[in-house]
Amino acid sequence: MSSRTAALPDRPKGKISNLKPLMRYLRPYRWRIAAAAVALVFTSSAVLGMGGALRYMIDAGIRSGNTHLLDHGFGLLMGVTLLLALASYARFFLVSWIGERVVADIRNDVYRHLIGMHIGFFETSRTGELLSRLTTDTTLLQTVIGSSVSIAARNTLLLIGGFILLLVTSPRLTSYVLLLLPLVVIPIIMLGRRVRFLGREAQGRIADVSAHAEESLNAIRTVQALTLEEYEHRRFGSHVEEALNAALSRIRMRAFLTALVIALIFGAIVTVLWLGGRDVLIGRITPGDLSAFVFYSVIVAGSVGAISEVIADLQRAAGAAERLGELLAVVPEITSSLASQPVTESGVRFEHVSFHYPTRPDKPAIHDFTLAVKPGETIALVGPSGAGKTTIFQLLMRFYDPASGSIRIGDVDLREWGLPELRGMIGIVPQEPVMFSGTARENIRLGNINATDAEIVQAARAASALEFLKKLPQGLDTHLGEKGIRLSGGQRQRIAIARALIRNPKLLLLDEATSALDSENEYLIQKALEILMHGRTTFVIAHRLSTVMKADHIVLMNDGAISAVGTHQELLKCSPLYARLAALQFQAEAS
């Protein structure tokens, strides 16, 4: 399977050979698999052994009228039944354990792979589809590994063993069974292909449902603000109906296949029973032989029916395995260097950097950007929306690599840093901070997972967050709700600032860090940020020019390029664009 970085395909082929990569997940549990195989052999042997015990009880006990032999046959049959029950318990437990364990390993690997993917990958992939692969597809694999494979193996053994015993019991009647076999196998093969195709379609429609729900729920405030509830419900309902219709088509075809197989198999059994009855009447076989033959015929028929059911499950699981394989085969474009770089200074140099976003390859987001920043300097990035200010942050965090040029921290190109090492020395306060489900304490600690409670309190106090956090029902241990829904925008931003403070970074990125605060808190945060920025190289994105008056240099950006660099007073004199932005903003603030 080739590595790709393009969008993922929606429709897998579903070939059963796609299940082969699962072997590497099964290999660590080979001893449990061996034990399950032994139990499987015991259960199959016990089922087949019941036919012999049945023949003995009828011919040696009932037919002869010998009570002692009848009791002996009854005891033999009960013993085989007890062995079957014990072996079935062992088989079910071991196989189910293996299924759960292997799928847990697969989910861990898929999630680890996903969170390590480059940001561009998520621009071209739907989050709902990725979640569907992580949950729905792995659940299909769990069904197969923890159940269907065992059922297929057991019924294969029963089918082979049953045919051998049929042949031993009555070659003549077995020949009739062999003649009728194609009537059962051919429909399974032909209709099974149709079931496989419909199964893939149903999986794709379910992924569409998940993707739409994830998108609308993530934007629930916008949906409700625009009164789009009914519109989104209708769109979701159409996806649900498509998924339902696809599932019903698959179920209808699978039910037809099952009914056809049952009709053919049991029709064949009735026919063979009629022929066997005639053989008993003329003395060609005994009643016990006929009973055993019918028993084995039922076993064989049941095995064929079960295998036909399992084939559909295996094909669906093969499709899921292919989807997961496609996902795991995507190679991250941003890779981490294995070399460890000493952190000697935090000066930053941009050398003729150009960059295009993957979703906008024709329009450069950054063009020929060259800038040298000394350690400890504060650089303010200003300019109209879409000028490329946030893209500079994305490149510094190495969410993307430049198409040309280089970015260096100290004398080391960012590509030569290990990603954890590089991002570990950077602290960022975004304009729209993200809160994770959990407590306020846990959210602040994300900046430094080794931070003590005292350090968390100190960071919260420095970010002017401690006062409102103490007023929450459980203080810092209050759960903030999904995405911090229990907090205001300004409160979330102060927690993000505390998260950056506790990180103690060498390079600080501030994306309008005080934009959601009132005047009083903005003043307090500015004081905290001045302490945080002291001695650190800092990049500040500011839409309000009044917040960057104290910057060492102001970089005016326009259309992805540097338009001018200087102090506030210098830019007022040499840059008409900066003078116009300043006049508009100061006039608005005065109003």
Image (spheres, grey):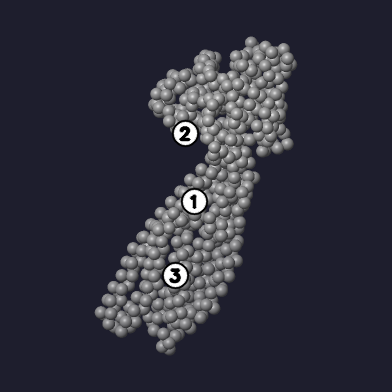
**Relative to 368, is 549 above or below?**
above
Q: Secondary structure at mark 2?
A: loop
Circle 1 residue? 139
Circle 3 residue? 158
Q: Residue 259 vs residue 552: left or right?
A: left
Residue 511 spot, x, y in % from top left: 59, 24
Circles 1 and 2: CB atoms closer than 8 Å: no
The residue that appears at 40% across and 77% down in the rendered structure is: 292
Q: In terms of image quadrants, where is residue 28?
A: bottom left
Towards the viewer: 571 or 407: 407
**Relative to 130, is 432 above or below?**
above
The residue that appears at 50% across and 65% down in the rendered structure is: 307
The residue that appears at 62% across and 22% down in the rendered structure is: 373
Circle 2 residue? 437
Q: CA distance from mark 2 to mark 3?
A: 51 Å
Towards the viewer: 251 or 72: 72
In what quadrant of the picture does the C terminus appear?
top right
The residue that appears at 47% across and 25% down in the rendered structure is: 502
Inspect the image, locate mark 2, and give the three-letter code of the amino acid beneath it.
Ser
Residue furthest out toward the left:
68
Q: In terms of image quadrants, where is residue 232?
A: top right
The mark nearer the N terminus, 3 or 1, is 1
Residue 338 spot, x, y in % from top left: 54, 39
Q: In terms of image quadrants, where is residue 571?
A: top right
Q: Secondary structure at mark 1?
A: helix
The mark nearer the N terminus, 1 or 2, is 1
Inspect the image, locate mark 1, and give the three-letter code of the amino acid beneath it.
Thr
Q: CA distance from mark 1 to mark 2?
A: 25 Å
Residue 163 spot, x, y in % from top left: 46, 75
Q: Residue 530 vs residue 383: left or right?
A: left
Residue 96 spot, x, y in % from top left: 42, 55
